[in-house]
């Protein structure tokens, strides 16, 4: 009762209303998801059932039994990525891996999404695309106001200790840059991880390794290369540690079309600067409406200095008023913290954020 806001009936009602609205949102999502039906898991998952595993410590909740990523470059403006992953739940805290998030936006669409559970006893479970729900970015309140990035959420049934859960999805993307990253290490230990690249005729690639010795690929065909690693230790999170993507093992691969560089491809800092300049070109140019407003504001100003300073002061005043309204709004007050979190994520959709 020492909290003054709790003693204020109006504030207490608003707090309860926000909590109730959040609860109703998740209830609505769950009601939209039909119950899972029995369905056989694919062969690539059943091959992991009898996989021999070492004795993990009490802090290991899951193990990534199998991961397979296939990147198919169709053109400079179209890339398909197919992903398969299977986890074995070891402890109750590993249940969270039963919820799958696949992000998408106006330049990236999810073309298929499936999930399965192989229980220690009983029949397999299956969930499909129609069972998924679409939500704004999880854990970032107000993200629907600042970005068009959303996520498809698929809840795999029975993610209990001893069970194996897995999922498979495919995304089709118009890339901002012809460069992808294979994150072959995560917080969970990895038993097997595979990465495959398919390129059109005449294309080339360059692979760079971070926090891991170089692994030579196996060339399956004239335009397909496969990488594989096994028994990769998980990264144990520590207090005040560097960002996860700064310490985890990864391979950065760049693609190069024939006949010269593409607008979304670079290999040097100068090339990156040119790419960014092309990406932002024209976005800072004043629109006809803004030019007209400046002319209106400065029509009565005779001094050249006043004609320069006055529009800037007017813009700053409008910005401050809008900033106060935004920060105090009950609907968008969480926008600024969300922006700060987005700025801290190195993979947040390039310049969209």
Image (spheres, helix red, strand yellow):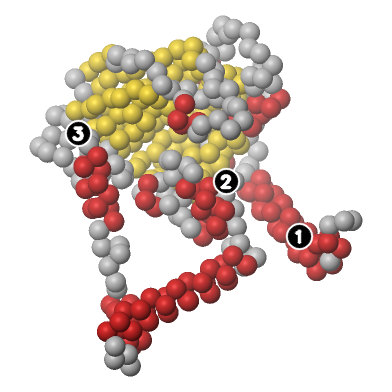
Q: Which of marks 1 and 2 is in front?
A: 1
Q: Distance between the residues labelled 1 and 2?
A: 21 Å
* Residue 272 % position (x, y): 25, 43
* Residue 236 % position (x, y): 58, 22
* Residue 163 % position (x, y): 64, 20
Q: Is mark 2 on a helix, strand or loop?
A: loop
Circle 2 crowding by C-alpha within 10 Å: few under 14, some 14–19, many from 20: few
Q: In this view, does 236 lie above or below 337?
A: above
The residue most toward the right is: 1
- Depth check, front residue: 276 or 70: 276
Instruction: Kindly identify which residue carries mark 2.
Output: 138
Number of the label disc, if any, that sits on residue 256 = 3
Q: How far apart are marks 3 and 1 (CA)?
A: 54 Å
In the picture provided, is 141 more to the left or to the right than 47? right
Circle 1 crowding by C-alpha within 10 Å: few under 14, some 14–19, many from 20: some
Q: Distance between the residues labelled 3 and 2?
A: 34 Å
């Amino acid at each position: 009762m020492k909290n003054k806001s709790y003693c204020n009936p109006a504030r207490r009602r608003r707090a309860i209303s926000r909590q109730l609205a959040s609860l109703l949102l998740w209830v609505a999502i769950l009601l939209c998801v039909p119950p899972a039906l029995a369905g056989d898991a694919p062969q690539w998952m059943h091959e992991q059932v009898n996989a021999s595993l070492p004795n993990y410590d009490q802090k290991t909740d899951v193990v990534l039994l199998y991961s397979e990523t296939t990147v198919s470059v169709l053109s400079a403006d179209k890339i398909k990525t197919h992903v398969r992953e299977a986890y074995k739940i070891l402890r109750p805290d590993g249940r969270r891996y039963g919820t799958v998030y696949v992000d998408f936006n106006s330049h990236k669409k999810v073309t298929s999404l499936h999930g399965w559970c192989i229980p220690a006893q009983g029949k397999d479970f299956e969930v499909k695309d129609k069972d998924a729900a679409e939500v704004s970015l999880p854990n970032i309140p107000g993200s629907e106001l600042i970005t068009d990035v959303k996520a498809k959420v698929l809840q795999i049934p029975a993610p209990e200790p001893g069970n194996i859960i897995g999922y498979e999805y495919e995304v089709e993307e118009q890339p901002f840059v012809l460069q992808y990253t294979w994150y072959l290490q995560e917080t969970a230990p990895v038993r097997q991880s595979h990465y495959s690249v398919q390129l059109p005729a005449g294309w080339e690639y360059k692979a760079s390794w971070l926090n891991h010795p170089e692994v030579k690929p196996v060339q399956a065909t004239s335009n397909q290369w496969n990488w594989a690693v096994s028994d990769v230790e998980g990264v144990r999170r520590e207090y005040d540690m560097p960002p996860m993507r700064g310490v985890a093992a990864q391979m950065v691969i760049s693609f190069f079309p024939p006949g010269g560089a593409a607008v979304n491809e670079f290999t040097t800092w100068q090339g990156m600067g040119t790419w960014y300049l092309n990406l932002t070109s024209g976005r800072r140019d004043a629109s006809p409406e803004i030019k007209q407003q400046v002319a209106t504001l400065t029509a009565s100003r005779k001094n050249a200095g006043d004609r320069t300073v006055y529009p800037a002061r007017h813009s700053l005043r409008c910005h401050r008023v809008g900033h106060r309204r935004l920060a105090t709004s009950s609907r968008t007050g969480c926008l600024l913290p969300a922006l700060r979190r987005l700025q801290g994520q190195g993979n947040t959709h390039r310049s969209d954020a």
